[in-house]
Amino acid sequence: MTADHTAQDTPLRDYMAGLGARARAASSQLSRVGETERTRGLNAMASAVDAARGEILRANAVDMQLGQQKGLDAALMDRLALDDKRVDAMAAGLRTVAGLDDPIGRELARWTRPNGLDIARIACPLGVIGIIYESRPNVTADAAALCLRSGNAAILRCGSESLNSSTAIAAAMRDALAGEGLPADAVQLVETNDRAAVGHMLAGLDGQMDVVVPRGGRGLVSRVQDEARIPVIGHLEGICHAYVDASADPQTAIDVVFNAKMRRPGICGALETLLVDRSVAADLLPRIARPLLDAGCELRGDEAARTHCREMEPASEADWNTEHLAPILGVRVVDGLEGALQHIRTFSSGHTDSVIAEDQAVCERFLAEIDSAIVMANASTQFADGGEFGMGAEIGIATGRIHARGPVGAEQLTIFKYVVRGTGQTRP
């Protein structure tokens, strides 16, 4: 199967404007749909993806063949690949989101004014959300599910490598929505490889798109953040730190650091910099380093770290600012908690930072003073994930200071409005 590139029959601007107009209409329809109907739609989407697995896997085989012809590296090919297990996971993810508490209509606060006005702050959808992502076709299902759960219409723009796979997934979900009497245009995929389509989305589709969420590498996210004329939810880099305090349990430090770096080195929650208290570095740093080195991790240390582990390469200043997304770890010896706090304040990207300590005062101060989207104590930074937070799935991690922060699940795709009820009051 190959995608039906309907955009080629219409000038791109008109095609993209049509997506926006249909999404806005679908968003309006969803505002009249209750929790029960949206839950039914999500479960129907899960069943449809399951039933369409043959078509989805055939489409993925086309993408895989094209990827090989393009010379995609092994990591990209792995992210692109689908099999029965991954289709099962997509369907299960849709059902998990269907089972989440509904975020729409929640009463966030309520009070009565002296004049008798009853004022409530109520959660409501953002409206039309554009999601721009790269080679993982499963994001098509995750993003659509979270948007529908939160009452939003989604315009999905996948990477060219996964267009056939994503088209098959989106088609199955759209058919399921229509079959349940819900607007199929609540889920729309941009069916063109033309890169100019992204520019139209970043411009807001003539006011029809409210928010854009980038999910991918630095190049994509940087472009979105630089060029978007509508609000962006996302993060640029995951320069994640772990500080090992003098009070740390040695085995906890060894296990947590290894997992944080090596479980999956290529994700945004992977550890990029290890900071070790000077007072325990001579004893503990070699013990932490050994399993990392044995697993093929390249360690790049400052001068003090290298005196305790000669197998480390020298670190450059750039290592403290780099998201390697690879088995490479910067290592620095610091003067206790103060030194760790200073380093993280200087170099953190605001994604995820962790402290490993038995001293609860150290943990609490770290958690209070590090202003990242996610701060942890005695836990691997690889838990920086919406699924691990109990959100069912996530569109990404947000590091901004407005609206969403941390894993972006269904609840984070809502905003609020004020509902004011009176009995005829007029303002003097």
Image (cartoon, rainbow, N blue to C red):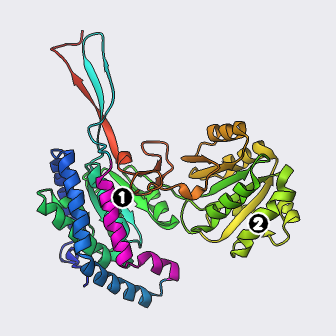
Circles 1, 2 touching at the beta carbon (< 8 Å): no
> On screen, 317 above or below 338?
below
Per the picture, the main secondary structure of the magenta-coloured stretch is: helix
Residue type, label 1: Leu
Label 1 sits on residue: 202
The quarter of the rendered structure image containing the C terminus is: top left
Residue 81 image-quadrant placement: bottom left
The quarter of the rendered structure image containing the N terminus is: bottom left
Secondary structure at badge 1 equals helix
Label 2 sits on residue: 289
Q: Residues within 10 Å of mark 1 (few under 14, many from 20)?
A: many
Q: Is residue 95 magenta?
A: yes
What's the residue at 32%, 37% (across, down)?
A: 416
408 or 388: which is nearer to us? 388
What's the residue at 73%, 69% (across, down)?
A: 291
Q: Is residue 266 magenta?
A: no
Mark found first going from the N terminus, 1 or 2: 1
Mark count: 2
Rounded to the nearest angstrom, the CA distance separating label 1 from label 2 is 44 Å
The stretch of residues the image draws in magenta is 73-100
What's the residue at 31%, 77% (across, down)?
A: 165
Left or right of 281? Residue 361 is: left
Residue type, label 2: Ala
Left or right of 404? Residue 185 is: left
> On screen, 140 above or below 341?
below
Secondary structure at badge 2 equals helix
Counting from the top left corner in percent of width and height, residue 405 is at: 47, 46
Counting from the top left corner in percent of width and height, residue 355 is at: 67, 48
408 or 44: which is nearer to us? 44
